Amino acid sequence: MRSLRPLSLAVGLLLLGGVFGPLAATLPARAASTTIEITDVYNPVAAADEWFQLYNMSKGSLTLTGWSICTNSTCVSLPTTTIESFSLAKFKASALTGWPTSGMDGANDMLGLKDQAGKPVDSLNWGVPVTTWKNYEAFKDMLWNPGIKAPDPTANQSFFRMALASDNDKPTDWLSNVKGQTGGPAATATPAPAATAGPLTNTVTPTPTKNPQTGGEFPFLLAVGLLGALTGIRYFRRGVTTSRNL
């Protein structure tokens, strides 16, 4: 009878170790604390209608203070903006102070993002980058040669990232569209309100996410079941011993 007690304890500890060991090993890696990426760029003929979207792919809200957005020729400050976790913020480019009056070049240009320290965070470019661009040196390690193919530089074109959370950091991660190709407006990778005239309007759009699976549920249930079986055996044997004594 007493020999079952150390056996039960040893088996219990072994099973618990088997549960929490795989559980710790299968937990997903922690997301980066500050990860903002460009997801959409609308490059119309009318520069006043240009806009772009940023996505916060981290697990906490981020406040962009002192960040800037750059074309091939200039960098302008972004307004202080808080983007919730896994959400989007849309910016009307022409409302930013210092944005080029002619807008972005439809055939050959770039859009790059810098953090509060002036460090390049993300970028995309269409056409072939030019070494004489004012911001070429700052973003040269991120630029593609050639970049995304501009579908029609003389039309209302848009560029949008196919995967919000991750991609291969290549031009093929992006799709482009032109108003008139499909009979509708330029496409976007994620839903966003239409650009409006007047002051800058930032819109944050929640993006649903799924809770990651840890893979530790089955071992835990198995451990509980085995411990229960050992306890049942213990009390069964006690009952047998009692009946014999009687």
Image (cartoon, grey):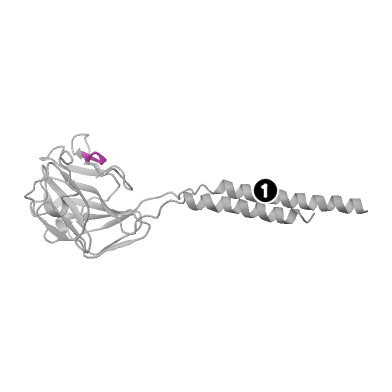
- x and y, in percent, of residue 125 in the image: 17, 46
- Point 14% across, 60% down: residue: 76
**In screen coordinates, is 205 left or right of 224?**
left
- Point 59% across, 50% down: residue: 220
The answer to whether residue 172 is magenta is yes
Q: Which residue is under mark 1?
A: 226
Q: Classify mark 1: helix, strand or loop.
A: helix
The answer to whether residue 70 is magenta is no
Between residue 236 and residue 39, name the one nearer to us: 236
Pick the quarter of the image with the N terminus.
Answer: bottom right
- x and y, in percent, of residue 63 in the image: 29, 63
Image vertical order of residue 241 relative to residue 77, above or below = above
Specify start and end residues of the magenta stretch as a single range: 171-176
Q: Residue furthest right?
A: 246
Q: Residue furthest top?
A: 182
- x and y, in percent, of residue 221 in the image: 61, 48
Between residue 55 and residue 226, name the one nearer to us: 226
Q: State how many labels appear.
A: 1
Q: Residue furthest left?
A: 132
Between residue 133 and residue 161, name the one nearer to us: 133
Three-letter amino acid code at disc 1?
A: Leu
- x and y, in percent, of residue 48 in the image: 13, 52
- Point 40% across, 55% down: residue: 30
| Crowd around label 1: few <14 · some 14–19 · many ≥20 (10 Å) | some
